[in-house]
Amino acid sequence: MDHLSFEATGDPGPAGRTAPPLDDVDRAILRELENDGRMSMRTLAERVSVSRSNVYARVERLVAEGVITGFTARIDPVRAGLGTAAYVLLTIEQHSWREVTARLREVPYIEHLAFVGGDVDLVMLVRTPDNVTLRDVVLARIHALPGIRSTRTWLIFDEAAGSRRLH
């Protein structure tokens, strides 16, 4: 179970720790893989100055512990045909978050969703090919779900990427 599952988590571990401790080599491995997740283990080992067997074991451990959750390509959404983007804010009925979350995961074009504190319950990043599709996603698909009380849509005019680096 990952931290993005919106489910109750189990034992946080010793002293309330929710993440395994990482040393400098682990952090160096993560930095290198964030830059290029396709690099060979040999190249990774050379870059972090450890043996190949050490880097293999560490990467396997980081995957097993859920620190590394996958290897993926970074895609430009506009060049991939998803030129319309919006933040959609939802207010939901109390105690419906599990069912709402499960159903939202089935709605196409929702790239990210997060439960937040404040005036709204959920913030979603939605990317669609055009405004007509965005309208369909929000008005026909999201509004039709049981447990949704209201939505607000903030159209994104322009975006700039952050560093995307965790370490």
Image (cartoon, rainbow, N blue to C red):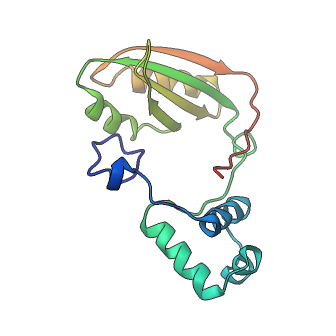
Residue 46, placed above or below residue 83 = below
| Front one among 120 and 58 | 58
Where residue 83 appears, as percent x and y from the top left, is 70, 33
Q: Quadrant of residue 158?
A: top right
Dividing the picture into quarters, in which one does residue 139 lie?
A: top left
Q: What residue occupies the far left of the structure in this picture?
A: 95
The x, y position of residue 7, in whole percent, is 30, 42
How many numbered discs, if any? 0
In screen coordinates, is 142 left or right of 157? left
Residue 90 in the image: state x and y as whole percent. 43, 19
The residue depicted at 66 percent of the width and 52 percent of the height is: 167
Quadrant of the snapshot with the N terminus: bottom left
Residue 121 in the figure: left or right of residue 110 = left
Q: Give left or right: position of 3 versus 97.
A: right
Q: Name the residue rendered at 23%, 24% in the picture.
A: 95
Nearer to us in this view, 72 or 19: 19
Residue located at (42% from left, 44% from top): 4
Please say if 103 is above or below 54.
above
Please determine whether, in this image, residue 160 is positioned above or below residue 117: below
Q: Quadrant of residue 143?
A: top left
Q: Nearer the viewer, residue 58 or 128?
A: 58
Tell me, yes or no, if residue 59 can be seen here.
yes
Which percent across, then down, holds residue 51?
Answer: 66, 86
Does residue 89 sit above or below 64 in this rendering? Answer: above
The answer to whether residue 10 is left or right of residue 157 is: left
In this view of the protein, can residue 13 be seen by the observer?
no
